[in-house]
Image: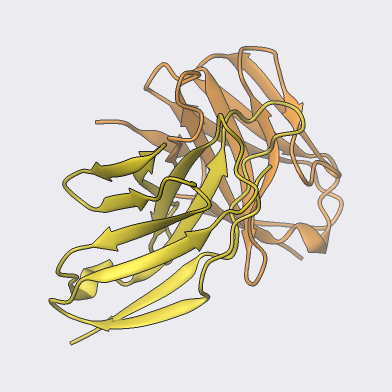
Amino acid sequence: DVKVTQSSRYLVKRTGEKVFLECVQDMDHENMFWYRQDPGLGLRLIYFSYDVKMKEKGDIPEGYSVSREKKERFSLILESASTNQTSMYLCASSLRASPYEQYFGPGTRLTVT
Amino acid sequence: LAKTTQPISMDSYEGQEVNITCSHNNIATNDYITWYQQFPSQGPRFIIQGYKTKVTNEVASLFIPADRKSSTLSLPRVSLSDTAVYYCLVGDSPNAGNMLTFGGGTRLMVKP
């Protein structure tokens, strides 16, 4: 059974903190994605990676960075958390041959105070 | 990237067939049409994908006319558990300049 796991279900951080969100997939997928979802704005792509150490900016990369050192793991980093980064963060993965058939993790609800 | 337009919301009753239509007038030759389902507090779940004509799996059917400018997701005999948001996406590959974009989706409410 396909599985994408995220390190935390809920997270509360203070403004200015450095925040790490981890995502692991066990399906040997080449592509991995980070989205945020906000009411009224739908899902927006932050970054994606199509291979180890490779990354591409999505629609809203400002304030975020990513790291992909191993194929199964994709990390999202908030360098200095701000209140407008309070959101639901969703990780997904897919095969290179089927980039639109993505498998999502359960999400991390991040609150920045 | 082809923009998609879907109804914001739909209501249905248990046991009915539900059809959700998505417009994508600027679909490109290489683009596929993909539908996702999302329940509250969960990540989206892939439902079905197609390129042309009709695709059917154990969950839904996808109808795509010859001009491919729209598509219809058909859910047979819905139940209360089908209450969710349904997203239509159109695209080929999420490389630079061709981002995978989820629109607002269609909020389906199934009533008893």
The residue that appears at 27% across and 42% down in the rendered structure is B55
- Give coordinates of residue B68: x percent, y percent: 48, 47
The residue that appears at 40% across and 50% down in the rendered structure is B65
Q: How is the image coloured?
A: by chain
- For the image, the number of numbered tags is 0
The C terminus of chain B: image quadrant:
bottom left
Q: B76 and B111: which one is in front?
A: B76
State which quadrant residue A49 falls in.
Answer: top right
The N terminus of chain B: image quadrant:
top right
The residue that appears at 81% across and 47% down in the rendered structure is A17
The residue that appears at 74% across and 38% down in the rendered structure is A58
- Give coordinates of residue B54: x percent, y percent: 28, 44
Q: Is residue A49 left or right of residue B59?
A: right
- Give coordinates of residue A34: x percent, y percent: 62, 39
Q: Note the chain letter of the orange one.
A: A
Q: A100 and A12: which one is in front?
A: A100
- Give coordinates of residue A91: x percent, y percent: 54, 40
Q: Is residue B75 left or right of residue A5?
A: left
Q: B96 and A86: which one is in front?
A: B96
Residue sticking out furthest to the front: B66
Q: Above or below — where is A97 with respect to A108?
A: above
Give the drawing colour for chain B.
yellow
Residue sticking out furthest to the bottom: B112
